[in-house]
Amino acid sequence: MLFNSFAFLLAFLPCALMLHFAAERFAPQWRLPLLAVLSFAFYGYWDWRFLPLLGLSILINWGVARAFGHLGRNTLIWAAIVVNLLVLGVFKYADFALGLASNLGGTEFTPLALALPLGISFFTFHHIMYLTDLKAGRAPQMGLLRYTLYIAFFPQVLAGPLVRWSEIVHQFDERPYQRSDAAERFARGLVLLTIGLAKKVFIGDPLSVYVNPAYEAAAAGAVSTVAAWQATLAFPFQIYFDFSGYTDMALGIALLFGIVLPQNFETPYRATSLRDFWRRWHMTLSRFLRDYLYIAMGGNRHGFALQLFALFMTMTLAGLWHGAGYTYIVWGMAHGAGLVAGLLWRKAGLPMPPLLGWALTFSFLALTFILFRAPTFEVAGTMFDALIGSDIPGERFRWRTIALAAAVALAGPTAWTFVQRLPPARWVAVLTAIVFVVILFKIGDDANYEFIYFQF
């Protein structure tokens, strides 16, 4: 179920919180089993047929971790990582690989047309992080129940953030409602959930009106210059408010259950370089790429040439992770090339005024996001052509929602920082309640959009 749905907000979440409070208060030994059941119920609501995949994934990887603890054989960990990636590859990349084989070999292969299980990329990466740290001696053995919650805790199972075991497992042993600041943390969770909903419903979703029709027109073969520019400027903010809104909801919901998840965004559109952007955007993915890909490929420890190669390949693989398509791969390659260019610029000691750096960075992001959003190179090419001029008449440029989104993204603090600064005052509670009710009316009146990152 969507976080921005009546089923979740008015049924699942209240019932889950009441059950969790009762368990924590009267039978604390049942708190973790209850969270596990709630997590599987939440995941199964989407499609119960994928529950065995999630369950077997947890059971097998936990079993490998236990076997490694007894035998100490690194081959067990490597085999498990390979199997995890193969399972991800079958569901996410099989048809892409078959299409590539058809193009190269001249033989037509029938697509498998497998449905992509929601969250498979994220829970696969959680397995890999834990197993890799276990092999390196950084992670401890843990029981099946705690490992299950590490992988499947429902606020983050579908689209992150990517959580390291060390950030969450110790919290499972706490009594969150016995803390002296329990009421304040619960209230801040509610405010964070409301802010995330507001970002999604009031800013992210309305921007789709600028984006979707333009790409549909481009797919049909022609799009006006005005529509192309509207979409190009709107999409960076649409995906930001959509995904950061989801993250704020996930962090807020987790806080309601006494769990603190890591932040995922730090005002990324203030970045003055591409490296700065990736330190602020989807931060938990960025550190995964750094720690488990870039460093594994040598990083900056084995010469400058290898560093450039590792940087470029890391971002190329990041593009492939985002989607099984050539446009995603080229998007990743473009960011790899941009990061390499930035590194060469810094090595040369050349200056970059902050304002110019910001303008170049945002322009690069907006233009490369066309590749990210377009389903094919043909659609992307049509969009790029329209940006530099078109004879197709377009409507008047609509800028208000884009300007609002830009102002909030550039001027405001992150939702987490804002919520932590709020005083525990009655007016905050009243205002949050009013905004939440308005959001419910908005959800009831408009189309309810899925989160963009659910497809990854």
Image: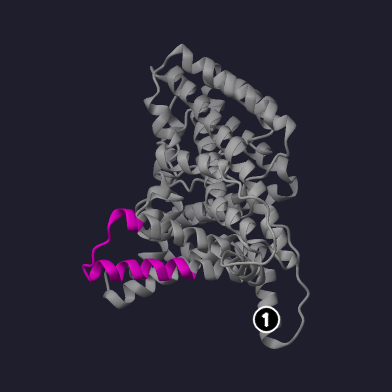
Span shown in magenta: 333-357
What's the residue at 26%, 75% (across, down)?
A: 303
Number of marks present in the image shown: 1
Q: Position of residue 326 (x, y in %)?
A: 60, 71
Three-letter residue code for mark 1: Ala
What's the residue at 33%, 70% (across, down)?
A: 298
Q: Is residue 334 magenta?
A: yes
Compared to residue 214, the image places residue 430 above or below, namely above
Tell which of 320 and 43 is nearer to you.
Answer: 320
Q: Residue furthest bottom?
A: 106
What's the residue at 53%, 15% (across, down)?
A: 430
Q: Is residue 84 magenta?
A: no
Q: Position of residue 121 (x, y in %)?
A: 57, 56
**Image quadrant where one finds the C terminus:** bottom right
> In which image quadrant can residue 424 be found?
top left
Q: Secondary structure at mark 1?
A: helix
| Side (left or right) of 182 relative to 435 | left
Q: Position of residue 361 (x, y in %)?
A: 40, 58
What's the residue at 57%, 44% (across, down)?
A: 242
Q: Position of residue 23 (x, y in %)?
A: 57, 21
Tell which of 241 and 166 is nearer to you.
Answer: 241
Compared to residue 342, the image places residue 452 above or below, namely above
Q: Which residue is mark 1?
A: 101
| Side (left or right) of 103 relative to 135 | right
Dominant secondary-structure state across the stretch colored magenta: helix
Q: Is residue 32 visible?
A: yes
> In which image quadrant can residue 152 be found?
top right
**Image quadrant where one finds the N terminus:** top right
Q: Is residue 134 visible?
A: no
